[in-house]
Amino acid sequence: MEKIKLGQIVTAVGIKGEVKVYPYTDIPERFEEIDSLMIESKNAEILGVRYMKNMVILRLSGVDDRNAAEALRGKNLYIDRKDMWEMPEDTYLVKDLLGMTVMDPEGNRVGKLVDVIQNSAQDLYEIEQENGKKFLLPAVGEFVQTVNLNKRIMVVRLIEGLVEL
């Protein structure tokens, strides 16, 4: 089973056992599309979902009071990859991108994707070159030409000066 991290419980809400979750998905409403999840390695059914600003408030089975909710503070929430929703085209999980070999269109190795910085405008890919230097590449079609998850290769088009910044 491959677990995908959906978020982290940050605190309890109220006295009836609800928990506030910091979502790791760019669409928090995804929590409405699933019936159950794992708190670390223990299964829990989702009994209710609501939202408070950019946070998700969950009512979970087996969490019936504030003390039980407080005990979950800092715990991560997961879903089995086979139970995930369908991903839109050209949308990838960060964990699938990390470590990919980055090439230019001519087949020259540019480096390795070491981090994805999630920004409000667009994600930024942090690419580490052979010499250890790193640069950021906007995750947009103008720069990212293809992503092959099976071969673990990303082909990017670089503009002059981008790598030197």
Image (spheres, rainbow, N blue to C red):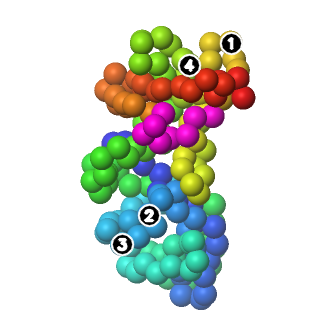
Q: In which image quadrant can residue 133 be found?
A: top right
Disc with the residue nearer the chain's start (4 vs 1): 4
Of tags 3 and 2, the one toward the viewer is: 2
Of the residues shown, which amino acid type is indicated by label 1?
Asn
Q: Mark 1 points at which residue?
A: 131
Residue 159: image location, x then y, percent: 56, 27
**Residue at x 61% of width, y 87% of height:** 14
Circles 1 and 3, Cβ within 8 Å, touching? The answer is no
Q: Distance between the residues labelled 2 and 1?
A: 37 Å
Of the residues shown, which amino acid type is indicated by label 3?
Glu
Disc with the residue nearer the chain's start (1 vs 3): 3
Disc with the residue nearer the chain's start (4 vs 2): 2
Residue 32 numbered tag:
3
Of the residues shown, which amino acid type is indicated by label 2?
Ile
Q: Quadrant of the N terminus?
A: top left
Let me know if residue 3 appears in the view. Answer: no
Q: Quick one: 3 or 92, which is closer to the camera? A: 92
Give the farthest residue toward the bottom: 15
Q: Quadrant of the C terminus?
A: top right
Residue 111 numbered tag:
4
Q: In which image quadrant can residue 71 be found?
A: bottom right
Q: Residues within 10 Å of mark 3 (few under 14, many from 20)?
A: few
Q: How far apart are marks 1 and 3 (CA)?
A: 45 Å
Of tags 3 and 4, the one toward the viewer is: 4
Disc with the residue nearer the chain's start (3 vs 2): 2
Of the residues shown, which amino acid type is indicated by label 4?
Gly
Residue 87: image location, x then y, percent: 31, 51
Magenta residues, dominant SS class: loop
In the image, which residues are magenta? 136-143
Labels in figure, total: 4
What secondary structure is marked by label 2? loop
